[in-house]
Every structure is written in structure tokens, then in C-alpha cells.
Image (cartoon, rainbow, N blue to C red):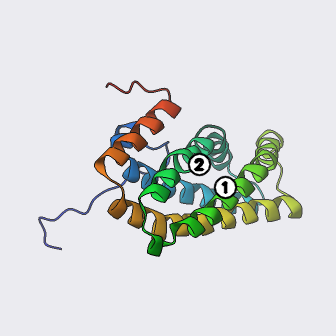
Amino acid sequence: MNSKTVPRQRGGCLAPTDLNLIRRPLEFIAEDHLRERLICAALDRIADSPLPDRGDLEMVLSFLELEFSLHHADEEDGLFPLMLKRCEPEDEIDKTIVRLQAAHREAALSKPKILVLLRDLLHSGDSPDIEARDLLRAFAASERQHLIVENAIILPIARVRLTKDDLTALTRGMQCRRGLDQTS
């Protein structure tokens, strides 16, 4: 890299993904994945801390309450069907998507317990007990595992297989889920 080359900067991931990026849906999803990695790190800090940081608790709660389900819907209702439509048999994408859908279902089942736990910690100021620590760590580990698959397999293949029309449809669905004006 020479002195005139500036590396591409991503957002700080402390706030929800910038909605201006939604017109580039695969980049939006990739940015969401970076944010989710930050959330997993915060879950680990909460689990490991004798006194969890209020900012971490609030950030994770906000993510789980507002962004998590939207992100999964972007993949389940938008990206995955398009991948199944466009991928070649040798991509074996169907097997990968089945694994990811199972991980999403597992996360959706765990999410209510995690929310209750985080709210309790936020209001009580207590340290998580052993069971709570195990739950937080397991959730973070599971999320990291499926993020690896999405980043290493799904997104690279999507960049090759999806058409411009597919990406436009993916953007529209993502906008609709967020209540955004599609004509802007």
C-alpha cells in the first residue's frame, strides 16, 4: 500500500448499520455481520464480568430487540431464496442454507431467554450466575459459527451468482421490512 492508498473504512459498528448502505444489500448484510460480531464480544464481556457494563447491556438489548430479527429475515426471506434460485448444483448451497436456517431457528428460540436475562442484569446491576454465563457464551459462540459460514460461503457465492435484478429485489425486500420509502 502506498502513501496515497487509503484502506476502506467500515463503520464503528456501535450503531445499527447505516441505512444508506441498503442499496448495496450484500454490503449491508456484511456490515450487519460485523455488528453482530461486536455484539458477540459484548455478550462474552457480560458473561465474564463480575459487574457487566451498562453500555454493553443496552447495546446488546437494542440489537436483539430491533435488528436481530430484521437481519435474519433479510437472509431467510430475501437472500437465501435468491441463492437457491441462482446457484449451480455444484455450489451445494442448499445444504449450507439448511444448516443456517437451523441456526437461525435455534437463535430465535434462545433470544427470549437472553432478553429476559439481559434486562434482569440491567435492572439489578448483579453479576450473571453460572447458568446465565453459560447461556450468554453459548449464544455468542453459536452466532459466531454461523457468521463464519455466511461470510466465508454465502456472501462470496452471492456476489458471483446473484444478478442485478436479484440485488434490486433483495434491496426492495430489506427496505420494505424496515418501512422505508422504496422510491427515495
Kind of residue sitting beneath label 2 = His
Which residue is rendered at x = 51% and y = 51% of the image? 81
The quarter of the image holding the C terminus is top left
Which residue is rendered at x = 47% and y = 64% of the image? 154
Q: Is residue 124 visible?
A: yes
> In the rendering, which numbered label is found on residue 104?
1
In the visual, does 74 lie left or right of 184? Answer: right
Instruction: Identify the secondary structure beneath mark 1.
Output: helix
Residue that badge 2 annotates:
72
* First reached walking from the N terminus: tag 2 or tag 1: 2
- x and y, in percent, of residue 139 in the image: 72, 60
Q: Is residue 31 above or below residue 130?
A: above
For the view shown, which residue lies furthest in the front direction? 89
Kind of residue sitting beneath label 1 = His
- x and y, in percent, of residue 64 in the image: 65, 44
State the CA–CA distance, disc 2 to disc 1: 7 Å
Q: Nearer the viewer, residue 72 or 130?
A: 72
